Image: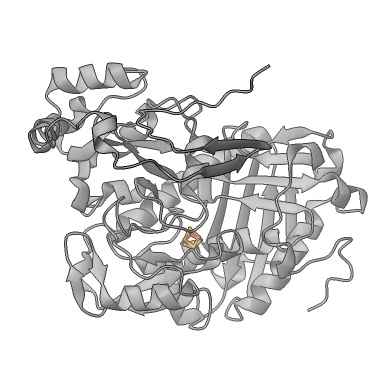
Amino acid sequence: MSFEDIPVDVGVIYEGERIRWKDTFVELGGPRVEHKFELVRVRPLDQVEDGKITIIGPDLKDMEPKSTHPLGILVEVAGKELEEEMEGVFERRIHEFINYIQGFMHLNQRYDIHLRLSMASFNKGLNSFEYVGKVMIRLYKSEIPIIEKIQVTFITDPEKVKELYQEALKVYEARDARIRGMRDEDVDVFYGCTLCQSFAPTHVCVITPQRYANCGAISWLDGRAASRVDPKGPIFVIEKGECLDPIKGEYEGVNKVLKEKSGGVIERVWLYTAFGYEHTSCGCFEAIAFYIPEVDGLGIIDRDFKGKAVNGLTFSAIADITAGGTQVDGFHGISIEYMRSPKFLQADGGWNRIVWVPKRVKEKVKDFIPPELVDKIPTEEDVSNVEELKEFLKRVGHPVVERWKALEEAKPPEEKPAEEAVIGPLPTVTAAVGGFRVIFENARIYADRVIIKRIK
Ligand code: SF4
């Protein structure tokens, strides 16, 4: 495949490339704009003009440096063997293919896309969506040969993006609804996805009927369609094998595949919990379930939430702890659709354990929260810090309050004073952190907190 007519390099080596704001020429989508989307539709053969690229609204060259714009990407494909069920998986490849372009960064999916074009690539001549469209069309046709015809439309006109965004939301909802009602127990295979390993090398998504992919873009049905089209591709079959724990969601076959695909780093996974051997999180998750130790409950924060969560942290601060493809106890990347699943964090208590959620997310999943709990789970409008949260949960009788009583009863007796608890002095301990050396000699230390300050 040749990209000689593209002014910058194109290749898999650019996939993990990050473009910082200072190096950015333009930003498309992202948190600063309300309407953005990407959508793939399967159309009849006579409705697609192969190779056609359309731009509705300003092109890259018409944009001011350091400006931000709404963006819609509509990819229409046709082919005798194509089925509507394949749309979700084709759509997820937009992320991969655009990231192959040197100086173009694509993050997230569906209604949440965030792209940046670097100043360096713009200056090299990458100044039109025409180039982006050409790359996408060539990659789609070479990677998925059953696509016979493909046309791509880029929309930057704000009114048009807004209009088509509403249409896209309806398509996503219809896709998600198709899988509801299917149970993990009813299938012999799950699907795995390693598309995000360019960003998180040990991450593997395990996609089951009741645990949607972290990015919210690939369902079990999508996984099935993708693995049929391209059995050796990034989305593959996982034989479930023996169920080792139906509550936590541990399967022999899943453990085996995870170990192999994560290079031996992840040995076990529990699909329905945020603790222990929880599912890994890449960076594309739609939301995060995070532990709040003061109330022994889990909060949820989603990518669109602009303020600080009840624990005082922003989405990006919590995402930094969660992402990277490892298992971080109590920090768990999830999709919005997983919150609608009966298996949602079932080993942790499910919705009974959720103590805080942004209002917009609550509205989206309200019909799937047990009715008796809906008013007992506060949002940013009800509480703004952990103390207020505690009071709220007590006042409404949230089920997590019962756990506090049980924890109180299970507490060990008062600890002995420090000097009695320490047997003998510690040897000399030296710690060097950030240019400081801290030396403890013959120390007996008992402290709730150690604060080290520079002495002026
Ligand atoms: S989040 Fe998971 S399912 Fe989605 S693209 Fe990444 S690895 Fe695949």
Determine whether, in the image, residue 81 is placed left or right of residue 3. Answer: left
Relative side of 456 to 87, left or right: right
The answer to whether residue 454 is above or below residue 78 is above
| Position in image of residue 428 (x %, y %) | 50, 44
Residue 376 in view (yes/no):
yes
Counting from the top left corner in percent of width and height, residue 192 is at 42, 71
Q: Is residue 405 above or below residue 246?
A: above
Quarter holding the N terminus is bottom right
| Residue at 19% over, 25% down | 375
Figure disc tally: 0
Q: Is residue 346 above or below residue 440?
A: below
Residue at horizontal 44%, vertical 52%?
Answer: 171
Among the 4 quarters of the image, the one containing residue 236 = bottom left
The C terminus lies in which quarter of the figure? top right
Q: Please report the residue visible at 23 percent of the width from the left and 28 percent of the height from the top.
A: 417
Q: Nearer the viewer, residue 373 or 330?
A: 330
Q: Left or right: 213 with respect to 423? A: right
Q: Is residue 43 visible?
A: no
Residue 204: x, y in percent? 45, 66
Q: Is residue 339 above or below residue 160?
A: below
Q: Nearer the viewer, residue 246 or 1?
A: 246
59 and 375: which one is in front?
A: 375
Q: Is residue 358 left or right of residue 345?
A: right
Taking the view exactly as shown, the residue that stands out farthest to the right is: 124
What is the basis of the colouring in this image?
Answer: one colour
Kindly identify the residue that appears in the image at 86 percent across and 52 percent down. Answer: 121
- The image quadrant of residue 289 is top left
Provide residue 158's location: percent of width, then percent of height. Answer: 66, 34
